Image: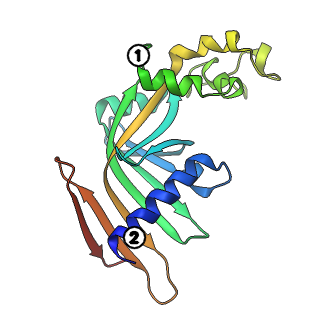
Amino acid sequence: MNHEEILSKIYATLTRGTADRKSPLHTPTIATIGADGSPNARVIVFRKFKPEQRVLIFHTDLRSPKIEELRGNARISWLFYHPNEKLQFRIAGEATIHSDAGDELKLKQWQATWNFGRRCYMGAAPSLISENVTSGLPTEIVEREPTTEESEVGFPNFAVISTKINSIDCLELHNQGHHRSLFSWDENGELQTNWLTP
């Protein structure tokens, strides 16, 4: 495949990853940089891909440590691996935090989130030390889905992180020898492509 065909396949695979909950691309790993300069990686749910804008989206709690990390350094890395397709994507970009009550993207993503998913933002802040094992959820909704009205208490804690893609490092695994390509965009949005040794 040439670079155009590879990028088209990457975009199609990413698009399927947001729609198919069984896709291995639905739960990629993202990495941020802590205040001490150390990397912090975690698995997230891949919510949306906007190929025309080169934007990846996930949801998080505004009170989570990754928010402060991104406020200190907006650089973010995404890692996707599809075992059946034998494809690995390493995507680097700049993150934007959408947390204001009137933010259009935040509102749109909140409205598209099921009440059961909204539960995550109704409880205690992430990463707090607890004396006992805990879900952090309010006891009254531990075993049930909240109503839409009840779930609104989580809206202030809900944040959307969008990533503007700066580069995609794609590794295609083959028995006859792996192939690797790099796609990078300059400040004007011009695409540059290169072949790399695996």
Disc 1: which residue? 100
Q: Is residue 110 visible?
A: yes
How crowded pointer 2 is (Cα within 10 Å; few <14, some 14-19, many 20+) is rated as few
Q: Indicate whether 71 appears above or below 100.
A: below
How crowded pointer 1 is (Cα within 10 Å; few <14, some 14-19, many 20+) is rated as some
Question: Disc 2 marks which amino acid?
Answer: Glu
Counting from the top left corner in percent of width and height, residue 16 is at 57, 54
Disc 2: which residue? 5
Q: Callout 2: helix, strand or loop?
A: helix
Q: Is residue 27 visible?
A: no
Q: Quadrant of residue 38?
A: top left
Q: Quadrant of residue 161?
A: top left
Seen from the viewer's position, the closer of residues 52 and 48 is 52
Q: Indicate whether 18 appears above or below 9.
A: above
Question: Disc 1 marks which amino acid?
Answer: Asp
Alpha carbon separation for disc pair 1 and 2: 39 Å
